[in-house]
Amino acid sequence: MSSEVLVSRPHFDGRAVAHGAPDSEAPEGPEALQSSSGSHTAGYRSAKYCPAEWFSNYHSILLQSGTDHRDAQDVQRRSKTLYQDTEADTLQRQAEGTRLLGEALLDIHSWRSELQRHIDQLLADTQALLALKTRLEKALDATEAPYAIATDNLNCRTRRMGPDLVKDAVEEELLKEVDLIRSVQALLKRTTAQVVTQIKMNREAKQMLESDWSDKYQAYNLDDHCGRHNNMSPDTKHHPSSGALQEQVCNRSAWTKFTQDNLNKALQEEQATSSLRLLVEQLLQDTTKDLTFQCSSVDQALSQRCVELVEAKAQLEMKLTKTLEQIGAQEKNIVALHKAIDNKEAPLRVAQSRLYLRSLRPNMELCRDEPQLSLEGEVRQINATLTALHQQLSDARTSLSHLEESRMALVKDINCKTHSLFIDRDKCMTQRKRYPTVSALSGY
């Protein structure tokens, strides 16, 4: 084993150098290293400091310790001030955040209540429009019966005979009724399409409001849960990335504008629904009024026409009765004329026979005496009478022929009037009793 003993140097504090402490250098020369009398002590002498280095070293340690003590006190003082200030600021910011969360909850609740009010209003409006749509469809179905009645009346009246096949006031009113029903049906169809479109728009607006309401419901629950958090809450934990700003997040004005736009859209649809409901109600009233008024006009024209037909038929029947009486009287007159003509045969034969016999008188006896003149006058008178009787007989036969023609014409016209009366009164007016009621035309 070597005779030299290795001894470590004392610890040298670099902080002393930083504070300007002089470097402890080993003295040179014979003062720094005392010679030994023996070679066996050389290892001990080479590893030791001098007393000045010893004093300098522990003085440096004392100075550094004091400096560290003062620095520690300053750090403690500043730390105490810092954590007191930050504690107050943290508590203040937490209270401010809680307050703002409460205000946000009130704001969300207010918007959500407004959304709910409009959702309920849109739902009620949609239900009302659905009821109006049903009424329009019922009213449209109810117009089929009047249309069928009017067209059937027109078809029935085409079967009138002879001169009764006339374009009278009844036909004009029936044509007006058919045109009116067609226009009413087209109007009801267009209005039903408008109602269906408005129902679709109401449902779209309601869906937007419900989506916004649902988002605000979730946001309310989340903010309410956030507001219930405090420093003693056991369910809080660190989320380092939650504080980072997100570019896709909207600002307060955009958030408010989104809900306000939805509410404005809903309000617009509510106003459109209200206007449409008033329009449909007025439309149903007007169409019902027009149809019932036209139905009354047709019924009145039919009644008037039936009165005219009955009166005409009565007059024709009275004239037919008189014509039949005249025919009977004329036939008797013809018989009397025939008898009168026959009654003139014997006097004519007598007078002609007398003239013939007197024409056989001889010589001067064949003179035109008073008897001769009388007989000649008698023959002329009888012949003139016969001529007159034959002429009267001819006139009587002509008159009888005319009376027969009149009778046939009267009978034919009476049959026409009877047939027309049957069509107008027994068929048309009976069918029109099945005309829909006012409530049915109004869609109830």
Image: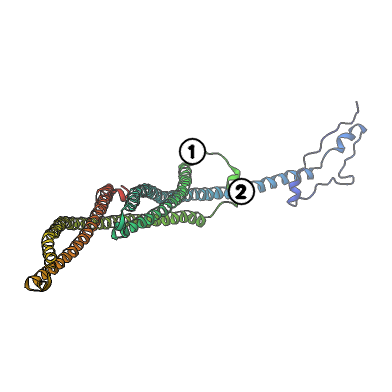
Of the residues shown, which amino acid type is indicated by label 1? Answer: Ser
Which image quadrant is residue 358 in? bottom left
Of the residues shown, which amino acid type is indicated by label 2? Answer: Val
Left or right: where 408 falls relative to 118: left
Which image quadrant is residue 166 in? bottom left
At a point 84% along the width and 45% down the height, the residue shown is 26
On the image, numbered disc 1 is attached to which residue? Answer: 233
Q: Position of residue 283 (x, y in %)?
A: 34, 56
* Residue positioned most to the left: 370
Q: Position of residue 119 (x, y in %)?
A: 41, 48
Relative depth, front residue between 337 and 18: 337
- Tell me the distance, in whole angstroms, between the alpha carbons under discs 1 and 2: 32 Å
Q: Total number of numbered labels?
A: 2
Residue 40 appears in the rendering: yes
Secondary structure at numbered mark 1? loop
**Location of residue 280 with respect to 395 vertically, above or below:** above
On the image, numbered disc 2 is attached to which residue? Answer: 75
Q: Are marks 1 and 2 in contact (CB under 8 Å)?
A: no
Give the color scheme: rainbow, by chain, secondary structure or one colour.
rainbow
- Residue neighbourhood size for the residue with mark 1, other residues' Cα within 10 Å, grouped as few (<14), some (14–19), many (≥20): few
Q: Position of residue 93 (x, y in %)?
A: 50, 50
